[in-house]
Amino acid sequence: MAARTPLIAGLVATAALAAAGLVAAQTPAPKAAAPTVKPATTTPAPKVVAPSAAVPPAAASEAPPSEEAPPAVVVPSAPVAAPPVPPSEVAPAPPPKAQVAEKPAESTLKRTRYDIAIIQALDKVTAGTLRFEAAVGQPVRYKTLVFTVKACEQTAEDEPQEDSIAYLTVDSQPRAAPGKPAPPPRQVFKGWMYASSPGLNPLQHPVYDAWLITCRAAAPPKPATP
């Protein structure tokens, strides 16, 4: 009896192990967990920004109302040049006037007038001079020149400079040759002469020269002797 007990215990243990192995064989083995694959860390590629083109009018109208459009730049218009005038339509400039000495403006006081002008003449060829008197309105000959005094006067007291002024004409008239008529006279001077300024309005002649010396009154007539 004592010998059967260990045997029975051994059988029971063997049966228990067999049963345990059978249960283990029928129980499915747990699946191994799949390894977790971490995504590789990648640097995002930079964005390529294309240059912005001109915004069409339609896109400009879609701008948000909060953004105001910049004020328009006003470019000042350039002045319009007048069209050039053709040369044929340009009026010719008037010719320059000859500078002729004019009679100075008279003062408030009346000038004194005289009857005789004293003139000095020069022959440029012979260097001879002659001083002579010419009565107003009476022609006087000096070689080939004929002097006719129209007026001879003295400046008034309120004028800035004391002077003698004579208005006369000078004609060139050579003497007639024997048996031939006298040639017609040719005027070589007409205007005012000034005693203080002989070069202001001089006689321009290739052979002769003349200028005013002064004016004087004619001598009173002498009474007739009984």
Image: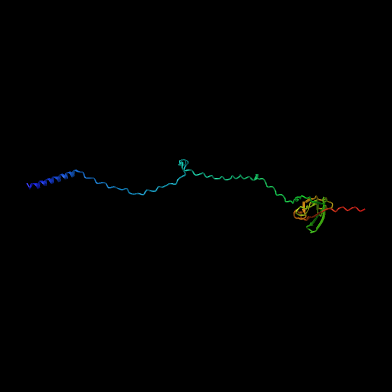
Q: Work out whether residue 191 or residue 19 is closer to the camera in this orientation and state it.
A: 19
Q: Position of residue 16 (x, y in %)?
A: 14, 45
Query: Residue placed farthest to the left in the image?
Result: 1
Judge whether 58 appears above or below 181 on screen. Answer: above
- Labels in figure, total: 0
Q: What's the coloring here? A: rainbow
Q: Position of residue 195 (x, y in %)?
A: 78, 55
Q: Is residue 118 left or right of residue 77?
A: right
Q: Work out whether residue 169 or residue 75 is closer to the camera in this orientation and state it.
A: 75
Q: Work out whether residue 108 or residue 62 is closer to the camera in this orientation and state it.
A: 108
Q: Position of residue 34 (x, y in %)?
A: 26, 46
Q: Is residue 80 left or right of residue 194?
A: left
Q: Position of residue 181 (x, y in %)?
A: 83, 50
Q: Is residue 3 left or right of residue 53?
A: left
Query: Residue placed farthest to the bottom in the image?
Result: 127
